[in-house]
Amino acid sequence: MSDTDLPFLPFALPDITDAEIAAVTEALRSGWVTTGPRARAFEQAFTDYLGGNGVHSIAVNSATAGLHLALEALGLGPGDEVIAPTLTFTATVEVVRYLGADPVLVDVDPVTLNIDPEAIRAAITPRTRAIMPVHYGGLACNMDAILAIVREHGLKVVEDAAHALPSTWQGTLVGQLQSDITVFSFYANKTITTGEGGMAVTRDPKLAERMRVMRLHGMNRDAFERFSSKTPAWYYEVVAPGFKYNLTDTAAALGLVQLQRLPQFVQRRQYLAQRYHAQLASLPLVLPATAPAGDVHAWHLYVVRLAPSACMGRDALIQALSDRGIGTSVHYVPLHHHPYWRDRYQLTPEQFPQADAAYQAMLSLPLFTAMQDAEQDRIIAALHELLG
Ligand SMILES: *Cc1c(COP(=O)(O)O)cnc(C)c1O
Protein backbone atom coordinates (compact mmCIF):
# COMPACT_ATOMS: atom_id res chain seq x y z
CA MET A 1 0.00 0.00 0.00
CA SER A 2 1.41 3.44 -0.89
CA ASP A 3 1.21 6.35 1.52
CA THR A 4 -1.58 7.95 -0.46
CA ASP A 5 -3.83 4.93 0.20
CA LEU A 6 -3.52 5.41 3.94
CA PRO A 7 -6.14 7.46 5.77
CA PHE A 8 -5.25 11.12 6.29
CA LEU A 9 -3.46 11.59 9.58
CA PRO A 10 -4.67 14.90 11.01
CA PHE A 11 -2.50 17.35 12.90
CA ALA A 12 -4.60 16.88 16.05
CA LEU A 13 -7.62 14.95 17.29
CA PRO A 14 -9.38 15.08 20.68
CA ASP A 15 -9.19 11.96 22.89
CA ILE A 16 -12.84 11.27 23.76
CA THR A 17 -13.87 7.90 25.20
CA ASP A 18 -17.15 6.34 26.36
CA ALA A 19 -16.45 7.81 29.82
CA GLU A 20 -16.70 11.38 28.47
CA ILE A 21 -19.78 10.49 26.42
CA ALA A 22 -21.47 8.94 29.48
CA ALA A 23 -20.65 11.98 31.64
CA VAL A 24 -22.03 14.43 29.07
CA THR A 25 -25.14 12.26 28.56
CA GLU A 26 -25.71 12.25 32.32
CA ALA A 27 -25.37 16.03 32.40
CA LEU A 28 -27.91 16.37 29.58
CA ARG A 29 -30.35 14.02 31.33
CA SER A 30 -29.96 15.88 34.64
CA GLY A 31 -32.08 18.78 33.43
CA TRP A 32 -29.33 21.30 34.27
CA VAL A 33 -27.30 22.16 31.17
CA THR A 34 -26.01 25.68 31.86
CA THR A 35 -23.50 26.56 34.62
CA GLY A 36 -24.34 24.54 37.73
CA PRO A 37 -23.13 21.69 39.94
CA ARG A 38 -20.80 20.19 37.32
CA ALA A 39 -19.09 23.52 36.57
CA ARG A 40 -18.58 23.96 40.33
CA ALA A 41 -17.21 20.44 40.66
CA PHE A 42 -14.86 21.06 37.73
CA GLU A 43 -13.55 24.22 39.39
CA GLN A 44 -12.98 22.31 42.64
CA ALA A 45 -11.29 19.41 40.82
CA PHE A 46 -9.03 21.89 39.01
CA THR A 47 -8.05 23.60 42.28
CA ASP A 48 -7.35 20.17 43.80
CA TYR A 49 -5.28 19.19 40.77
CA LEU A 50 -3.13 22.28 41.27
CA GLY A 51 -2.69 21.31 44.91
CA GLY A 52 -5.09 23.78 46.56
CA ASN A 53 -2.91 26.27 48.45
CA GLY A 54 -5.52 29.03 48.37
CA VAL A 55 -6.04 28.85 44.60
CA HIS A 56 -9.40 29.95 43.19
CA SER A 57 -10.39 28.40 39.84
CA ILE A 58 -12.93 30.24 37.69
CA ALA A 59 -14.37 28.23 34.79
CA VAL A 60 -15.01 30.19 31.60
CA ASN A 61 -16.16 29.40 28.08
CA SER A 62 -12.71 30.03 26.54
CA ALA A 63 -9.20 30.99 27.54
CA THR A 64 -9.72 34.17 25.56
CA ALA A 65 -12.61 35.03 27.89
CA GLY A 66 -10.41 34.18 30.89
CA LEU A 67 -7.60 36.44 29.68
CA HIS A 68 -10.09 39.26 29.13
CA LEU A 69 -11.52 38.81 32.65
CA ALA A 70 -7.98 38.71 34.07
CA LEU A 71 -6.92 42.03 32.55
CA GLU A 72 -10.28 43.60 33.42
CA ALA A 73 -9.92 42.50 37.05
CA LEU A 74 -6.45 44.06 37.14
CA GLY A 75 -7.98 47.36 36.00
CA LEU A 76 -6.22 47.66 32.64
CA GLY A 77 -7.44 50.48 30.43
CA PRO A 78 -6.57 53.07 27.78
CA GLY A 79 -3.00 54.36 28.06
CA ASP A 80 -1.72 51.16 29.67
CA GLU A 81 0.85 48.88 28.01
CA VAL A 82 1.11 45.10 28.29
CA ILE A 83 4.27 43.27 27.18
CA ALA A 84 3.75 39.96 25.33
CA PRO A 85 5.68 37.78 22.85
CA THR A 86 5.08 38.16 19.11
CA LEU A 87 5.23 34.37 18.71
CA THR A 88 1.76 33.58 20.05
CA PHE A 89 -1.87 33.27 19.07
CA THR A 90 -3.70 36.56 18.58
CA ALA A 91 -5.98 35.80 21.56
CA THR A 92 -3.12 36.55 23.98
CA VAL A 93 -3.17 40.21 23.04
CA GLU A 94 -6.54 40.90 21.41
CA VAL A 95 -7.91 41.06 24.97
CA VAL A 96 -5.53 43.96 25.69
CA ARG A 97 -7.26 45.87 22.87
CA TYR A 98 -10.75 44.92 24.21
CA LEU A 99 -9.86 47.15 27.17
CA GLY A 100 -8.40 49.93 25.05
CA ALA A 101 -4.85 49.25 26.26
CA ASP A 102 -1.87 48.57 23.98
CA PRO A 103 0.15 45.36 23.67
CA VAL A 104 3.90 45.84 23.27
CA LEU A 105 5.20 42.83 21.36
CA VAL A 106 8.73 41.55 22.00
CA ASP A 107 11.06 38.88 20.64
CA VAL A 108 11.57 35.34 21.91
CA ASP A 109 14.54 33.30 23.09
CA PRO A 110 15.96 31.39 20.08
CA VAL A 111 16.29 28.11 22.00
CA THR A 112 13.02 27.88 23.97
CA LEU A 113 10.93 30.18 21.73
CA ASN A 114 9.54 31.64 24.98
CA ILE A 115 9.43 35.38 25.64
CA ASP A 116 12.96 36.76 26.17
CA PRO A 117 13.33 38.40 29.61
CA GLU A 118 15.96 40.82 28.23
CA ALA A 119 13.50 41.90 25.54
CA ILE A 120 10.92 42.52 28.27
CA ARG A 121 13.34 44.77 30.15
CA ALA A 122 14.09 46.74 27.01
CA ALA A 123 10.37 47.27 26.32
CA ILE A 124 9.39 48.71 29.73
CA THR A 125 8.11 52.28 29.67
CA PRO A 126 6.34 54.42 32.31
CA ARG A 127 3.04 53.12 30.82
CA THR A 128 3.86 49.42 31.27
CA ARG A 129 1.35 47.75 33.59
CA ALA A 130 1.62 44.02 32.97
CA ILE A 131 3.52 41.16 31.34
CA MET A 132 1.83 38.22 29.62
CA PRO A 133 4.22 35.28 29.31
CA VAL A 134 3.09 32.41 27.06
CA HIS A 135 4.47 28.96 27.92
CA TYR A 136 5.13 28.14 24.28
CA GLY A 137 4.28 24.57 23.33
CA GLY A 138 4.06 23.60 27.01
CA LEU A 139 7.60 24.55 28.11
CA ALA A 140 7.44 26.94 31.07
CA CYS A 141 8.94 30.41 30.59
CA ASN A 142 11.83 31.53 32.81
CA MET A 143 9.46 32.71 35.51
CA ASP A 144 12.23 33.66 37.96
CA ALA A 145 13.56 36.23 35.51
CA ILE A 146 10.05 37.50 34.69
CA LEU A 147 8.95 37.74 38.33
CA ALA A 148 12.18 39.59 39.19
CA ILE A 149 11.39 42.22 36.53
CA VAL A 150 7.83 42.45 37.80
CA ARG A 151 8.94 43.08 41.39
CA GLU A 152 11.53 45.60 40.32
CA HIS A 153 9.03 47.65 38.28
CA GLY A 154 5.79 47.04 40.23
CA LEU A 155 4.04 45.27 37.34
CA LYS A 156 1.34 42.57 37.12
CA VAL A 157 1.71 39.16 35.46
CA VAL A 158 -1.03 37.26 33.63
CA GLU A 159 0.27 33.92 32.37
CA ASP A 160 -1.21 32.63 29.11
CA ALA A 161 -1.05 28.98 30.12
CA ALA A 162 -3.11 27.73 27.14
CA HIS A 163 -0.33 25.20 26.38
CA ALA A 164 0.81 24.57 29.94
CA LEU A 165 -1.42 21.93 31.54
CA PRO A 166 0.58 20.52 33.18
CA SER A 167 3.94 22.31 33.06
CA THR A 168 6.26 23.07 35.94
CA TRP A 169 8.85 25.77 36.57
CA GLN A 170 11.52 24.61 39.06
CA GLY A 171 9.16 21.97 40.36
CA THR A 172 6.11 24.21 40.81
CA LEU A 173 3.05 23.73 38.60
CA VAL A 174 2.12 26.61 36.33
CA GLY A 175 -1.00 27.90 38.13
CA GLN A 176 0.82 27.91 41.50
CA LEU A 177 3.58 30.41 40.61
CA GLN A 178 3.75 33.92 42.05
CA SER A 179 1.88 35.61 39.22
CA ASP A 180 -1.43 37.44 39.55
CA ILE A 181 -3.63 35.31 37.28
CA THR A 182 -3.00 32.23 35.13
CA VAL A 183 -5.35 31.16 32.32
CA PHE A 184 -5.65 27.66 30.82
CA SER A 185 -7.45 26.65 27.59
CA PHE A 186 -9.65 23.62 26.95
CA TYR A 187 -10.00 24.26 23.22
CA ALA A 188 -10.40 21.17 21.00
CA ASN A 189 -6.66 20.55 20.44
CA LYS A 190 -5.33 21.46 23.90
CA THR A 191 -3.98 18.93 26.44
CA ILE A 192 -7.50 18.50 27.87
CA THR A 193 -10.64 19.68 26.14
CA THR A 194 -14.19 20.74 26.96
CA GLY A 195 -14.89 21.49 23.29
CA GLU A 196 -14.53 25.16 24.09
CA GLY A 197 -13.57 26.31 27.58
CA GLY A 198 -10.93 27.65 29.89
CA MET A 199 -9.98 28.22 33.52
CA ALA A 200 -8.69 31.39 35.18
CA VAL A 201 -6.72 30.73 38.35
CA THR A 202 -5.63 33.19 41.05
CA ARG A 203 -4.67 33.20 44.71
CA ASP A 204 -6.07 36.71 45.22
CA PRO A 205 -9.65 36.48 46.55
CA LYS A 206 -10.53 40.00 45.28
CA LEU A 207 -9.41 39.22 41.74
CA ALA A 208 -11.29 35.89 41.92
CA GLU A 209 -14.49 37.65 43.02
CA ARG A 210 -14.22 40.29 40.29
CA MET A 211 -13.70 37.63 37.61
CA ARG A 212 -16.66 35.57 38.93
CA VAL A 213 -18.97 38.57 38.84
CA MET A 214 -17.80 39.80 35.42
CA ARG A 215 -18.03 36.27 34.01
CA LEU A 216 -21.84 36.48 34.27
CA HIS A 217 -23.26 39.89 33.39
CA GLY A 218 -21.83 41.62 36.47
CA MET A 219 -24.47 39.87 38.58
CA ASN A 220 -23.64 39.11 42.17
CA ARG A 221 -25.40 35.67 42.08
CA ASP A 222 -25.35 33.08 39.30
CA ALA A 223 -28.44 31.11 38.28
CA PHE A 224 -27.48 27.97 40.19
CA GLU A 225 -26.74 29.94 43.34
CA ARG A 226 -30.15 31.60 43.07
CA PHE A 227 -31.82 28.25 42.32
CA SER A 228 -30.22 26.49 45.28
CA SER A 229 -30.09 29.17 47.99
CA LYS A 230 -32.67 30.22 50.58
CA THR A 231 -32.95 33.88 49.57
CA PRO A 232 -35.57 34.44 46.85
CA ALA A 233 -34.43 32.94 43.54
CA TRP A 234 -35.59 35.96 41.55
CA TYR A 235 -33.39 38.48 43.37
CA TYR A 236 -29.94 39.53 42.18
CA GLU A 237 -28.01 42.76 41.84
CA VAL A 238 -26.05 43.99 38.82
CA VAL A 239 -22.87 45.66 40.03
CA ALA A 240 -21.07 46.19 36.68
CA PRO A 241 -21.64 45.77 32.92
CA GLY A 242 -20.29 42.22 32.81
CA PHE A 243 -19.81 39.60 30.10
CA LYS A 244 -21.33 36.21 29.20
CA TYR A 245 -18.31 33.99 29.75
CA ASN A 246 -19.65 31.15 31.93
CA LEU A 247 -18.86 27.47 31.19
CA THR A 248 -21.85 25.13 30.68
CA ASP A 249 -22.39 22.01 32.79
CA THR A 250 -22.29 19.84 29.66
CA ALA A 251 -18.80 21.18 28.91
CA ALA A 252 -17.76 20.81 32.56
CA ALA A 253 -18.93 17.18 32.58
CA LEU A 254 -16.53 16.55 29.70
CA GLY A 255 -13.78 18.47 31.49
CA LEU A 256 -14.16 16.48 34.73
CA VAL A 257 -13.42 13.22 32.91
CA GLN A 258 -10.60 14.74 30.85
CA LEU A 259 -8.95 16.12 34.00
CA GLN A 260 -9.08 12.65 35.59
CA ARG A 261 -7.32 11.28 32.52
CA LEU A 262 -4.68 14.04 32.47
CA PRO A 263 -1.94 11.97 34.19
CA GLN A 264 -2.20 9.32 31.48
CA PHE A 265 -2.39 12.02 28.77
CA VAL A 266 0.86 13.57 30.03
CA GLN A 267 2.61 10.20 29.95
CA ARG A 268 1.46 9.53 26.41
CA ARG A 269 2.58 12.96 25.19
CA GLN A 270 5.97 12.54 26.86
CA TYR A 271 6.36 9.10 25.29
CA LEU A 272 5.52 10.41 21.80
CA ALA A 273 7.80 13.45 22.20
CA GLN A 274 10.68 11.20 23.28
CA ARG A 275 10.14 8.96 20.24
CA TYR A 276 10.29 12.00 17.95
CA HIS A 277 13.43 13.17 19.72
CA ALA A 278 15.20 9.84 19.39
CA GLN A 279 14.17 9.12 15.82
CA LEU A 280 14.53 12.57 14.28
CA ALA A 281 17.90 13.36 15.86
CA SER A 282 19.89 12.44 12.72
CA LEU A 283 17.88 14.73 10.40
CA PRO A 284 18.68 18.38 9.53
CA LEU A 285 16.13 19.59 12.08
CA VAL A 286 16.35 21.74 15.20
CA LEU A 287 14.29 19.74 17.68
CA PRO A 288 12.25 21.52 20.37
CA ALA A 289 13.89 22.39 23.69
CA THR A 290 13.17 19.95 26.49
CA ALA A 291 12.35 20.97 30.08
CA PRO A 292 15.22 21.36 32.57
CA ALA A 293 15.89 18.20 34.63
CA GLY A 294 13.08 17.61 37.12
CA ASP A 295 10.58 19.83 35.31
CA VAL A 296 7.48 18.81 33.35
CA HIS A 297 6.94 19.84 29.71
CA ALA A 298 3.26 19.58 28.79
CA TRP A 299 4.15 18.81 25.14
CA HIS A 300 1.08 20.53 23.77
CA LEU A 301 3.14 21.12 20.59
CA TYR A 302 6.12 19.44 18.98
CA VAL A 303 7.67 22.23 16.90
CA VAL A 304 10.67 21.41 14.70
CA ARG A 305 12.74 23.89 12.68
CA LEU A 306 14.46 23.04 9.42
CA ALA A 307 18.24 23.48 9.65
CA PRO A 308 19.82 25.69 6.95
CA SER A 309 21.43 22.53 5.51
CA ALA A 310 18.05 20.89 4.80
CA CYS A 311 17.37 20.08 1.14
CA MET A 312 13.98 21.81 1.08
CA GLY A 313 12.22 24.74 2.67
CA ARG A 314 9.44 24.71 5.25
CA ASP A 315 6.55 25.30 2.83
CA ALA A 316 7.75 22.52 0.50
CA LEU A 317 8.09 20.12 3.45
CA ILE A 318 4.56 20.87 4.66
CA GLN A 319 3.25 20.24 1.13
CA ALA A 320 5.24 17.01 0.75
CA LEU A 321 3.93 15.72 4.09
CA SER A 322 0.39 16.68 3.11
CA ASP A 323 0.85 14.79 -0.19
CA ARG A 324 1.71 11.77 1.96
CA GLY A 325 -1.48 12.21 3.99
CA ILE A 326 0.11 13.85 7.03
CA GLY A 327 -1.30 17.03 8.54
CA THR A 328 0.99 19.59 10.14
CA SER A 329 0.61 23.18 11.30
CA VAL A 330 2.64 26.32 12.04
CA HIS A 331 2.67 27.94 15.50
CA TYR A 332 2.58 30.73 14.79
CA VAL A 333 2.58 33.27 12.02
CA PRO A 334 4.07 35.87 14.41
CA LEU A 335 1.69 38.63 15.35
CA HIS A 336 3.92 41.26 13.71
CA HIS A 337 3.07 39.69 10.31
CA HIS A 338 -0.70 40.05 10.75
CA PRO A 339 -2.10 43.19 9.12
CA TYR A 340 -3.94 44.47 12.18
CA TRP A 341 -0.96 44.29 14.57
CA ARG A 342 1.63 45.18 11.93
CA ASP A 343 -0.20 48.29 10.74
CA ARG A 344 -1.51 49.53 14.06
CA TYR A 345 1.89 49.38 15.77
CA GLN A 346 4.13 49.80 12.67
CA LEU A 347 5.92 46.51 13.30
CA THR A 348 8.63 45.07 11.05
CA PRO A 349 10.35 41.65 11.00
CA GLU A 350 13.70 43.34 11.84
CA GLN A 351 12.34 44.15 15.30
CA PHE A 352 11.88 40.42 16.02
CA PRO A 353 14.86 38.60 14.45
CA GLN A 354 14.56 35.43 16.56
CA ALA A 355 10.81 34.92 16.23
CA ASP A 356 11.04 35.74 12.53
CA ALA A 357 13.84 33.29 11.80
CA ALA A 358 12.05 30.59 13.79
CA TYR A 359 8.80 31.26 11.94
CA GLN A 360 10.42 30.87 8.50
CA ALA A 361 11.83 27.44 9.44
CA MET A 362 9.15 25.92 11.71
CA LEU A 363 6.39 23.39 11.49
CA SER A 364 4.42 21.55 14.19
CA LEU A 365 4.24 17.77 13.85
CA PRO A 366 1.15 15.81 14.96
CA LEU A 367 1.27 15.10 18.70
CA PHE A 368 -1.95 13.94 20.31
CA THR A 369 -2.72 11.20 22.82
CA ALA A 370 -5.01 9.24 20.49
CA MET A 371 -2.19 8.94 17.91
CA GLN A 372 -0.99 5.34 17.53
CA ASP A 373 2.71 4.44 17.54
CA ALA A 374 2.30 3.16 13.96
CA GLU A 375 0.90 6.52 12.90
CA GLN A 376 3.88 8.30 14.41
CA ASP A 377 6.17 5.81 12.64
CA ARG A 378 4.59 6.92 9.35
CA ILE A 379 5.46 10.56 10.10
CA ILE A 380 9.01 9.70 11.11
CA ALA A 381 9.50 7.53 7.99
CA ALA A 382 8.17 10.31 5.74
CA LEU A 383 10.58 12.82 7.31
CA HIS A 384 13.51 10.46 6.79
CA GLU A 385 12.47 9.89 3.19
CA LEU A 386 12.16 13.62 2.51
CA LEU A 387 15.09 14.99 4.54
CA GLY A 388 17.45 12.05 5.12
C1 LIG B 1 -5.57 28.26 22.28
C2 LIG B 1 -4.85 29.50 22.73
C3 LIG B 1 -5.53 30.59 23.27
C4 LIG B 1 -7.01 30.73 23.25
O1 LIG B 1 -7.69 29.69 23.85
P1 LIG B 1 -9.27 29.60 23.63
O2 LIG B 1 -9.69 28.66 24.73
O3 LIG B 1 -9.47 29.04 22.26
O4 LIG B 1 -9.84 30.95 23.77
C5 LIG B 1 -4.80 31.65 23.79
N1 LIG B 1 -3.46 31.65 23.75
C6 LIG B 1 -2.77 30.63 23.20
C7 LIG B 1 -1.29 30.70 23.21
C8 LIG B 1 -3.44 29.53 22.67
O5 LIG B 1 -2.76 28.54 22.10
Image: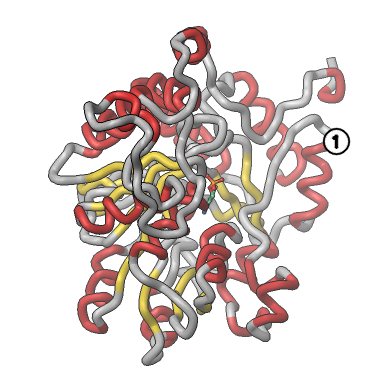
Query: How many residues crowd mark 1 within 10 Å: few (<14), some (14–19), many (20+)?
Result: few
Q: Position of residue 58 (x, y in %)?
A: 34, 43
Picture quarter with the N terminus: top right
Q: Position of residue 212 (x, y in %)?
A: 34, 47
Establish if 157 lies above or below 11: below
User: At 30% from the left edge and 26% from the top edge, which residue is drawn?
Assistant: 41
Establish if 109 lies above or below 43: below
Between 240 and 73, the residue placed more toward the observer is 240
Q: How many marks on residues?
A: 1
Q: Report if residue 240 is visible in the image.
A: yes
Between 348 and 255, the residue placed more toward the observer is 255
Q: Position of residue 226 (x, y in %)?
A: 33, 31
Most extreme residue toward the bottom is 126
User: At 41% from the left edge and 33% from the top edge, which residue is drawn?
Assistant: 270
Q: Report if residue 267 is visible in the image.
A: no
User: At 43% from the left edge and 30% from the top edge, which residue is drawn?
Assistant: 35
Between 309 and 45, the residue placed more toward the observer is 45
Q: Position of residue 94 (x, y in %)?
A: 57, 64
Amino acid carrying mark 1 in the image: Asp
Residue 346 shown left or right of residue 130 in the figure: right
Report the residue marked by disc 1: 323
Establish if 57 lies above or below 340: above
Residue 179 shown left or right of residue 87 in the figure: left
User: At 49% from the left edge and 8% from the top edge, which residue is drawn?
Assistant: 29
**Could you say which quadrant of the image residue 266 lies in?**
top left
Specify the color scheme: secondary structure
**Could you say which quadrant of the image residue 4 lies in?**
top right
